Amino acid sequence: MSCLDRIPWWLAIAAVVTLGLAPFVPEPHVWEKLRMLAQGTLTRPIDMFDLAFHGAPGESLEDDQPTP
């Protein structure tokens, strides 16, 4: 059993929403960085780190899904 299996779902979802979407105004970071990636303007290392940092909780939540 990994440490991710011991985290309650409500806490994992709260982390995804707060960290993934922070700051909420004027535009969530994940959305902004994904838009930059689609436009080809995601070139600065700090922007790449931001995308990885703000996307990590969602990715770990996705990886935690049980397999059939």
Image (tube, helix red, strand yellow):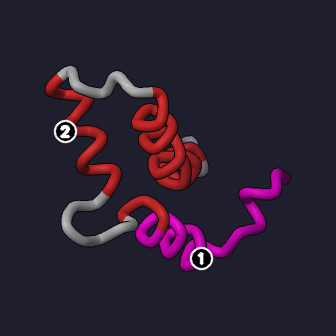
Apparent side of residue 66 relative to residue 24 in the rendered image (left or right): right
Q: Which residue is mark 2?
A: 35
- CB-based contact (under 8 Å), mark 1 and mark 2: no
* 17 in the magenta segment: yes
Is residue 66 among what the camera can see? no
Q: Residue furthest left?
A: 39
Nearer the viewer's eye, disc 1 or disc 2? 2
Is residue 20 among what the camera can see? yes
Q: Which residues are magenta?
A: 1-18
Which comes before the other along the chain, label 1 or label 2?
1
Separation of residues labelled 1 and 2 (CA atoms): 27 Å
Q: Quadrant of residue 18?
A: bottom left
Quadrant containing the C terminus is top right
The numbered mark at residue 11 is: 1
Work out whether residue 21 or residue 66 is closer to the camera in this orientation and state it.
21
Q: Residue at x 46, y 44 (%)?
A: 50
Place of residue 49 in the rendered image (x, y in percent of width and height, measured from the top left): 51, 37
* 8 in the magenta segment: yes
Place of residue 8 in the rendered image (x, y in percent of width and height, measured from the top left): 66, 75
Place of residue 65 in the rendered image (x, y in percent of width and height, measured from the top left): 55, 50
Name the secondary structure under disc 2.
helix
The numbered mark at residue 50 is: none
Check the image and report above or below for 15 versus 42: below
Q: Residues within 10 Å of mark 2 (few under 14, many from 20)?
A: few
Name the secondary structure under disc 1.
helix
Q: Residue furthest right?
A: 1
Check the image and report above or below for 65 versus 52: below
Name which residue type carries label 1. Leu
Name which residue type carries label 2. Arg
